């Protein structure tokens, strides 16, 4: 065997050794839970009494599809996902185009764009909750000061406004 062939075999073995821990972790933490969830979907299962589990076939799926709460949840998840993706794409492309313009202060703007990635999501959610507070929130105060609204907006109190608020948070955080 030549030296180059020996190196290729050694490199392949080292590569396999590096892949084995990831493959094992993927099996343990991703493949097994998904397989177990699929298996349990076909059983009536009580986690407090696992010995009482029994096979029900597609009955669990029939129950879910007949439940109006499932369809309402599905609708809300679809709206949230679609709005978030569309807004993130449009705003992301607009910001990318803006960042390539030779404007004064663009370096500061680039730095500010990294802010949502640096600050943990929990902190952002708490600050946003304070900002959107109906009574003492800075958003309502700003809108009232500018004369755009007469009464406070309850940003997080109704399902529609909460949906809009969480979409705004998601778009700001991940754009």
Image (tube, rainbow, N blue to C red):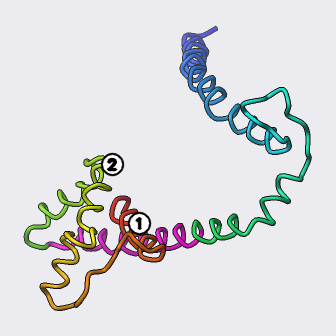
| Residue 145, placed above or below residue 84 | below
Which of the 4 image quadrants contains residue 73?
Answer: bottom right
Which of the 4 image quadrants contains residue 98?
Answer: bottom left
Q: Please report the residue visible at 63 percent of the width from the left and 23 percent of the height from the top.
A: 24
Say which of 90 and 147 sits in front: 147
Residue 123 on the magenta segment: no
Disc 1 or 2, which lies upstream in sequence?
2
Which residue is outermost to the top?
1
Q: Residues within 10 Å of mark 2 (few under 14, many from 20)?
A: few
In screen coordinates, is 30 left or right of 57?
A: left
| Residue 112, placed above or below residue 13 | below
Q: Which mark is residue 166?
A: 1
Q: Residues within 10 Å of mark 1 (few under 14, many from 20)?
A: some
Say which of 26 and 43 sits in front: 43
Say which of 42 and 141 sits in front: 141
For the stretch drawn in magenta, what is the main secondary structure?
Answer: helix
Residue 95 on the magenta segment: yes
Q: Please report the residue visible at 58 percent of the width from the left and 70 percent of the height from the top.
A: 76
In screen coordinates, is 107 left or right of 81?
A: left
Q: Please report the residue visible at 55 percent of the width from the left and 10 percent of the height from the top.
A: 3
Say which of 94 and 27 sits in front: 27
In screen coordinates, is 7 left or right of 109?
A: right
Q: In x, y percent, where is residue 53?
A: 85, 34
Q: Which mark is residue 122?
A: 2
| Extent of the magenta region | 78-102
Which of the 4 image quadrants contains residue 31?
Answer: top right
Tell me the CA gap for discs 1 and 2. 13 Å
SS at circle 2? helix
């Amino acid at each position: 065997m030549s030296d180059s062939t020996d190196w290729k075999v050694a490199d392949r073995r080292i590569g396999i050794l590096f892949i084995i821990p990831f493959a094992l972790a993927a099996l343990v933490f991703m493949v097994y839970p998904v397989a177990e969830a699929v298996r349990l979907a076909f059983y009536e299962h009580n986690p407090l009494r696992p010995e009482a589990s029994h096979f029900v076939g597609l009955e669990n799926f029939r129950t879910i599809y007949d439940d109006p709460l499932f369809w309402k949840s599905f609708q809300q998840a679809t709206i949230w996902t679609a709005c978030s993706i569309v807004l993130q794409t449009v705003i992301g492309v607009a910001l990318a185009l803006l960042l390539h313009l030779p404007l004064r202060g663009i370096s500061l703007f680039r730095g500010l764009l990294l802010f949502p990635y640096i600050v943990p999501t929990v902190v952002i959610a708490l600050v946003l909750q304070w900002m959107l507070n109906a009574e003492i929130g800075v958003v309502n105060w700003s809108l009232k000061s500018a004369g755009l609204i007469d009464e406070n907006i309850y940003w997080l109190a109704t399902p529609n406004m909460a949906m809009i608020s969480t979409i705004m948070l998601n778009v700001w955080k991940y754009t």
